[in-house]
Image (cartoon, rainbow, N blue to C red):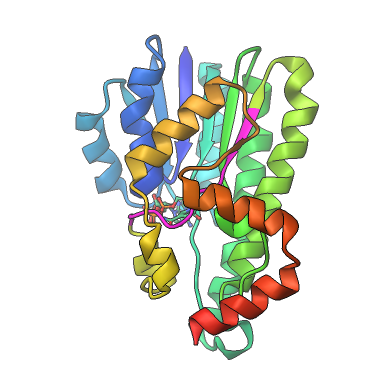
């Protein structure tokens, strides 16, 4: 059974991957989707060209991994693509975030890094030559960010992990792409806090565009996918400008 697996499929970029995967692969038998909001995943069944199998659950808890593991063992799928899109950000100064926000900081690490790593670990044994892994990093991975310290650090992990994993898996014919978009118009900001930075507002991208580019870069075996001229410039800037200067500039823009 030729399968694609998408986490964070109930919204935004993950949902868009499910919509586009049926066009990208002509011979998929199923797309396995993972997220907490089951009603959203049910709605996807009507939109997807490919039959959808739902794994409803919280990637911060054990149950959904148990169900996923059981299905892998029972159905022995040939996983052509894994898309790790589940993730969230929470903005605010690290030391000033109190109460519930404190837990969100550690949950961010657990979802953006730990869950992504665990899903990858569980899925690779079911992938073969020509398989693809797409991990949602972010342009925030390129350098540290004031007021987004933990989020940017989790995405730096995703970028670094994906590049090294891609290098390790190349000999097996499995290719890994880290997707590094700037701001994308999704529900992300209802969780992270509204987008106020004028520079970020200017570069707001659409999920369909980001996903189209990611799938095309994955097909071309590119290790990193960056959408839009603004973010390509940001990546280049972060390579050459000292990060201490970038942090100072960010301070001015966020005041
Ligand atoms: N939007 C942006 O500006 C932007 C920019 C760069 C990178 N990214 C990255 O792109 C990825 C997708 O973000 P998005 O923009 O599509 O945001 P989104 O619309 O908020 O989607 C996030 C997805 O993650 C799922 N999710 C969140 N917590 C979960 C949990 N504990 N267990 C299982 N699933 C969980 C959500 O599903 P449920 O709530 O139903 O569980 C949802 O499907 C994230 O990794 C994000 O960091 C986003």
Q: Nearer the viewer, residue 88 or 143?
A: 143
In the rendered image, the vertical position of residue 121 relative to residue 28, given as above or below? below
Q: Quick check: can you spot residue 86?
A: no
Number of marks = 0
Relative to 208, is 102 above or below?
below
Left or right for 54, reference 150: left
Q: Which residues are magenta?
A: 176-186
In this rendering, does residue 124 appear at all?
Answer: yes
For image coordinates 70% across by 15% down, the residue present is 173
**Predominant SS along the magenta part:** loop
Q: Position of residue 251 (x, y in %)?
A: 58, 82
Q: x, y percentage for residue 86? A: 48, 49
Q: Quadrant for residue 48, please give it.
A: top left
Tell me where residue 44 appears, x and y as whole percent. 26, 36
Give the residue at x 72% y 54%.
239
Residue at point 48% right, 34% down?
Answer: 214
27 left or right of 172 in image = left
Task: Choose between 222 and 235: the one closer to the eye.
Answer: 235
Residue 148 point in image, percent of width and height: 57, 72
Q: Image check: 137 left or right of 156? A: left
Q: Residue at x 64, y 36 (%)?
A: 120
Foreground pick, 146 / 188: 146
As drawn, the residue found furthest toward the top would be 27
Residue 189 vertical position relative to residue 122 in the rendered view, above or below: below
In the depicted structure, whether residue 44 falls above or below residue 3: below
Q: Is residue 244 magenta?
A: no
């Amino acid at each position: 059974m030729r399968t694609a697996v998408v986490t964070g499929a109930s919204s935004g970029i993950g949902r868009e991957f499910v919509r586009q995967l049926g066009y990208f692969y002509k011979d998929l038998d199923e797309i396995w989707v993972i997220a907490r909001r089951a009603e959203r995943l049910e709605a996807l069944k009507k939109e997807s060209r490919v039959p959808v199998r739902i794994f409803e659950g919280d990637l911060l808890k054990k149950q959904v991994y148990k169900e996923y593991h059981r299905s892998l063992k029972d159905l022995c799928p040939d996983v052509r693509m894994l898309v790790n899109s589940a993730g969230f950000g929470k903005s605010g100064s690290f030391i000033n975030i109190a109460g519930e926000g404190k837990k969100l900081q550690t949950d961010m690490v657990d979802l953006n890094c730990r869950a992504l790593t665990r899903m990858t670990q569980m899925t690779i044994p079911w992938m073969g030559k020509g398989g693809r892994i797409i991990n949602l990093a972010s342009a925030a991975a390129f350098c540290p960010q004031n007021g987004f310290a933990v989020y940017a650090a989790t995405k730096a992990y995703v970028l670094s992990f994906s590049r090294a994993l891609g290098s390790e898996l190349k000999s097996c014919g499995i290719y890994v792409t880290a997707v590094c978009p700037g701001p994308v118009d999704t529900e992300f900001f209802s969780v992270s806090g509204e987008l106020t930075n004028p520079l970020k507002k200017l570069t707001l991208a659409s999920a369909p565009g980001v996903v189209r580019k990611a799938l095309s870069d994955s097909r071309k075996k590119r290790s990193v996918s960056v959408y839009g001229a603004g973010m390509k410039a940001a990546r280049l800037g972060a390579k050459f400008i000292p990060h201490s200067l970038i942090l100072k500039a960010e301070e001015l823009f966020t005041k």
